[in-house]
Image: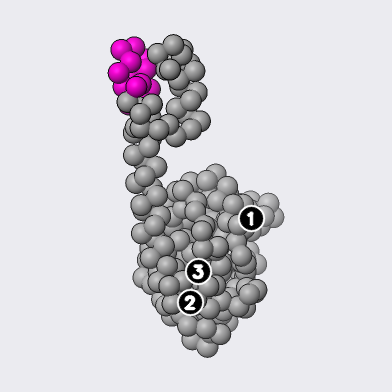
Amino acid sequence: MWKERTIADIKKALLSQTLPVNEINELKSDTRIGVQKLVTQYEKMREKKEQEHTRFLDMMQFEQAQYEIGNIYVAGIDEAGRGPLAGPVVAAAVILPQDFYLAGLNDSKQIRQVQREKFYDEITRQAVSYGISMIHNDEIDAINIYQATKKTMKKAIQLLDPTPDHVLIDAVPLDDLPCTSKSIVKGDQLSVSIAAASILAKVTRDRWMAEIDQVYPVYHFASNKGYGTKDHLDAIEQFGICPYHRTSFEPIHTLTKR
């Protein structure tokens, strides 16, 4: 079958479909060097896909444990923006369908921006429900970042419809929730739902910082996201602060007391 086909045809077939074992074995017996290279590439690609599928299933262990005891709607929640000197803290909560699969999904910080944007669209398209909340710098200064983080996380959960049966939280313990919950250290690397929430939170916050960069370009918010990079700190020294800076955070707190 395959020996009469051109290398271009074989390449197209290998890239577009999963071939049965007997056909792969036939291709392996093809003496053409180009075909042998294609088969090697194909097998490496298949191995990589299988490894990714296994990794993804490992990240489903917390969700799967809840499904097995009858909790259908399992939400993941994460935040973005606890550490920056400017901008809001954003929380996202998401309930994914039980058969959800998105190859490459991981902690948002480990994924390139272009890929995060694509994942954002795919997660919001497939989600049973999702909620995104933010608390701005003035309230962060008033109640402190830890309390602001917990408050915006709870607000994100309240936006979910249906109400979750169980919530998986990245690191921060939350009380007074409408359901059971579990706080997981490094949850965005261990839970699919938390990883998905981390994508929604980070993309939302990054977009917000890009918007305020248009108003205050001297601080380079689009690139530094409000973190204390050298260019950001130099701009604060030269121009002072803007309305989006967190005055309770150092070194801004000290600078504003001069």
Q: Disc number at residue 76?
A: 3
Residue shown at the point (37%, 17%) measured from the top left: 35
Q: Amino acid at mark 1?
A: Arg
Task: Give the Cα distance between marks 3 and 1.
Answer: 16 Å
Which span of residues is magenta-colored?
Answer: 26-41
Residue 81, x across and y down, in percent: 51, 65
Q: Residues within 10 Å of mark 2 (few under 14, many from 20)?
A: few
Dots 2 and 3: beta carbons under 8 Å? no
Element type at marker 3? Answer: strand
Distance (Cα) linking label 2 and label 3? 17 Å
Query: Which residue has dot 1 on it?
Result: 125
Residue 34 among those drawn in magenta:
yes
Residue 190: tell me if it is visible.
Answer: yes
The residue type indicated by label 2 comes to: Gly
Which residue is situated farthest in the right direction here? 215
Residue visible at 49% across and 86% down in the picture: 175
Q: Nearer the viewer, residue 22 or 54?
A: 22
